[in-house]
Image (spheres, grey):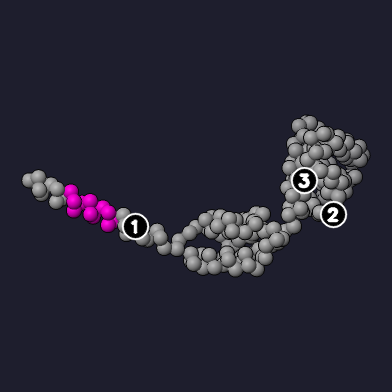
Amino acid sequence: MKLVKNIVYLFSLALLLSACQSADTTSKGKSKSLTAILNDVSDKYAVVGSIADSDEIKVDVEDTEKADKVKAYIRHQLKENDLDHYKITVQERNIEQVKKEDRWFKIESKALANLQNNKEYENVTMKKNDVELKKPVTFTLLAPISSADDSAEEYARQIKQNVNEFLQTKEIKEQSKGDAYKIVIYDRNNQVIS
C-alpha cells in the first residue's frame, strides 16, 4: 500500500514538473509586451520620453542618439514579438531644449494654480505654450472675458501683475534659471487683450 502511494506521489510530481517545464518553455518564446519593449529601448538608448496608443509609438531621444538606429531597433523588437502593426516615430531632441520645456511646464502649472487660488481668477486657463531654447518663454493665459468688455484691459493687467509677482518669487526665479519670459492674455474668443 505504501509502495502504491509512493508511486502515485512520484507520478504526480513528475506530471507536475513536466507541466511546469512546458509552461516555462512557452514563456521563453518571444512574447514581450509593448511596455517591456519600450523599457528595453529606454535601457539601451537615451530616451527622453515615449508614448504609444493602439496604432502608433512616438519616442523622443536625446540628439546624441541616431533616430534611424533607434527606430530600426524598435521595429525589430516589435516584429520579433508579433507587434509589427505600429507606426513608429522617433525624434531627436536637444536635451537643453527638453530641460527648458520641463522646467517651464512645472513653473506654468504652479503659476496657474497660484492664480486660480484667487476667486477672481479661478476660471482663467492656460494655452499650450511653445518653449524655444533661444527665445523668451511666452506664458499664455485665456481669460473668461471678451476683449470688447470695458474692464478687459484692467482685468488682463491684474492677471499679468499677479502672474509676474509669482514668477519673481525667489523659488520660481531659481527654477527658471534666468530664462526671459513674456505674459500674453487672450480673451475667451482667442483675441489678444494684453
Q: Main secondary structure of the magenta part?
A: helix
Magenta run includes residue 12: yes
Disc sitting over residue 45 in the figure? none
Q: Are marks 1 and 3 in contact (CB under 8 Å)?
A: no
| Residues at marks 3 and 2, CA–CA distance in whole angstroms | 14 Å
Up-down: is 52 above or below 165? below
Q: Are marks 3 and 2 in contact (CB under 8 Å)?
A: no
Query: Which badge, 3 or 2, is on the more N-terminal residue?
Result: 3
| Residues at marks 1 and 3, CA–CA distance in whole angstroms | 50 Å
Query: Which badge, 1 or 3, is on the more N-terminal residue?
Result: 1
Instruction: Work out whether residue 97 or residue 111 is closer to the camera in this orientation and state it.
Output: 97
Quarter of the picture holding the C terminus? top right
Category of crowding for the residue at label 3, using alpha-carbon neighbours closer than 10 angstroms: few (below 14), some (14–19), many (at least 20): many
On the image, the x and y values in percent for residue 74 come to 57, 64
Can I make out residue 113 in this image?
Answer: yes
Q: Which residues are magenta?
A: 9-19
Where is mark 3, residue-wise?
Answer: 104
Q: Amino acid at mark 2?
A: Lys
Magenta run includes residue 45: no
Name which residue lies at 83% across and 49% down: 137
On the image, the x and y values in percent for residue 133 come to 81, 54
Can I make out residue 151 in this image?
Answer: no
Where is mark 2, residue-wise?
Answer: 134
Q: Is residue 39 left or right of residue 97?
A: left
Where is mark 1, residue-wise?
Answer: 23
